[in-house]
Image: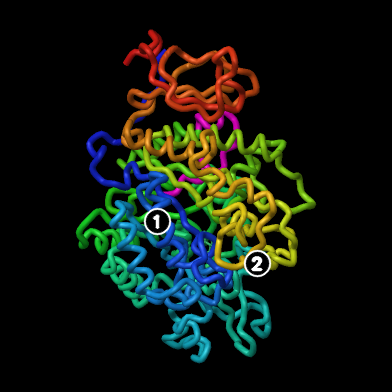
Amino acid sequence: MRTREFAAPEAHAGLEWWRSAVIYQIYPRSFADSDGDGIGDLPGIAAKLPYLARLGIDAIWLSPFYRSPQADAGYDVADYRVVDPLFGTLDDFDRMLHGAHALGMKVIVDLVPNHTSDEHAWFQAALKSPPGSAERARYLFRDGKGAHGELPPNNWQSVFGGNAWSRAPGDSQWYLHLFDRKQPDLNWDHPEVRAEFEDVLRFWLERGVDGFRVDVAHGLIKAPGLPDWDGHAAMVEGAEAGNSGDSDSAGPMWDQDGVHEIYRNWRRVLDAYPGERMMVAEAWIARQSRLARYIRHDEMQQAFNFDYLLAHWDAAELRAVIDSSLAASAAVGAPTTWVMSNHDSVRHTSRFGLRKPGARPKGIDANGEQPNEALGLRRARAAALLMLALPGSAYIYQGEELGLPEHTALEARYRQDPAFFRTNGAEIGRDGCRIPLPWKANAPSFGFGASETSWLPQPGNFAHYAADRQDGVSGSTLELYRRLLHLRRDYQLGAGQLQWHTVGASEVLSFDNGQLHAVINLGMKPVTLPAGTLLVSSEPLNAAGQLPGNTAAWLLPAHRPMNTSR
Ligand code: NOJ
């Protein structure tokens, strides 16, 4: 029986690159270290561009590499126009950018507009200036409550735990920081803040970047008067954290209507440049219709689909998320995006190996449930066939193509995530998904750099996942991703249409995208595939030619079964 059909907006299909692009996230400090200091850098990335081009991606997104005291791994920017010496120089950036372009890959960079570092010149000037000064007006300084102003101005909690307000030593006023105390929030009602960021956009656009990933895109404008709110301002939990649920209200710090004017202005800035420059919103908003407002025709081009990242290994849940995502983005003429892992979440290979597959722990350590590594990997490989068969744009997090798991036993003494410290370890934090990549099984730091040093220690099992162990090895996860990405391109799946098939087993997802038919078996029992030519499967078929449990396949059907005629 033919069921619901969704289209990547046909009027646009194939026009702009970002509608169907596969975008690979590079977390620079953990990707490749060219100088042996234990921290990845821009020349390291440049050296790996041929690897990325061969993988078959369309674009790379770089997490921040700007001047920063690194209190939140670079999401605390002290100068938006300067490359931090940890990562190289502006010349290194230009070389990397041109190298990527020469290989046909676009480059998008991270923009962090909600807050600066406390070491940014503006904040330093604010601290030296009195209450009520022009310097303070660029941030959210307020007098405290209580007889002597000794209590914070409101009850907001930081996303990383603890109070969202701090006072500099000796200072009478408090300043707001939704994240770490070293990340003061900017006042986006201030015209200088707006002008400055438009200028920062131009700075990188002039250098030739293809777009921006906008950090905390839903947080820039706060409700007038900064009213008290009893919810918890969380990043990764969507509706579970009360980030909006069924209501239009996401808490006074999130998703205020005023943010959209900012993005409409930015869109005009981008559109003044040749090429198809784009923006992707990082906005943790539970309600899809609210998220879609960020990708209206005159705002950003994409928004991360965190509902998809948060979905469990469950056929009904995934199908529901896919349907609602496609519908919400189609309603505004934007492409849907898909993502399973990033630098803020436990890697999906490990999440899928938990007793409740796809559960979303805030980090895993040796005291927690240890994922079943083999089962998690098996499901992650099948999940790649699901995600990469879907129309729209897909994001891959570095190491995902190697099947890399989370480091689930990192000792507390190595942890660096401010969330770990601000919650006194109650949140284990994000270090486990940020471990430097293994490139060579038998080299110091598994080939991450020229020395043994890596800013976070790598677990021994990373040797199995090293790129050189998988390169050219039939059946390896790396070769699987290469094959999938090339097939995705050949069959133009990103610009295609999804049409579900109704199948007998409730644990199976089955759909067409153009000529290609995808079957994802999320259950344990083997299922029979329709007749046709098998293009790729995440594991070998069983002796009876069936698709085993936790396995997926792409095929070209011999004939279109009666029940799916268009
Ligand atoms: C979202 C980023 O992805 C995360 O890594 C960072 O800690 C926060 N925004 C604050 O910038």
- The residues tagged by marks 2 and 1 sit, at their Cα atoms, a distance apart of 28 Å
Q: Which residue, as the protein is rendered here, is positioned at the far top?
A: 562
Which of the two labelled residues, at mark 2 and mark 1, occupies the earlier sequence position?
1
Q: Which residue lies furthest to the front in this view?
A: 442
Return the residue nearer the eye: 12 or 466: 466
The residue furthest right is: 367
- Determine which quarter of the picture holds residue 451: bottom right
Q: What stretch is highlighted in magenta?
A: 303-320
Give the label, 2 or 1, closer to the camera.
1
Q: Does the magenta stretch include residue 324?
A: no
User: Foreground: 481 or 169?
Assistant: 481
From the image, tell me which residue sits under label 1.
Answer: 49
Camera-nearest residue between 357 and 235: 357
Of the numbered discs in the image, which one, if any, rests on residue 565?
Answer: none
Q: Is residue 313 magenta?
A: yes
Q: Secondary structure under badge 1?
A: helix
> Where's residue 276, x and y in %?
25, 53
Few, some or many residues within 10 Å of mark 2 (<14, 14–19, 20+) = some
Instruction: Quickly name the residue at label 2.
Output: 416
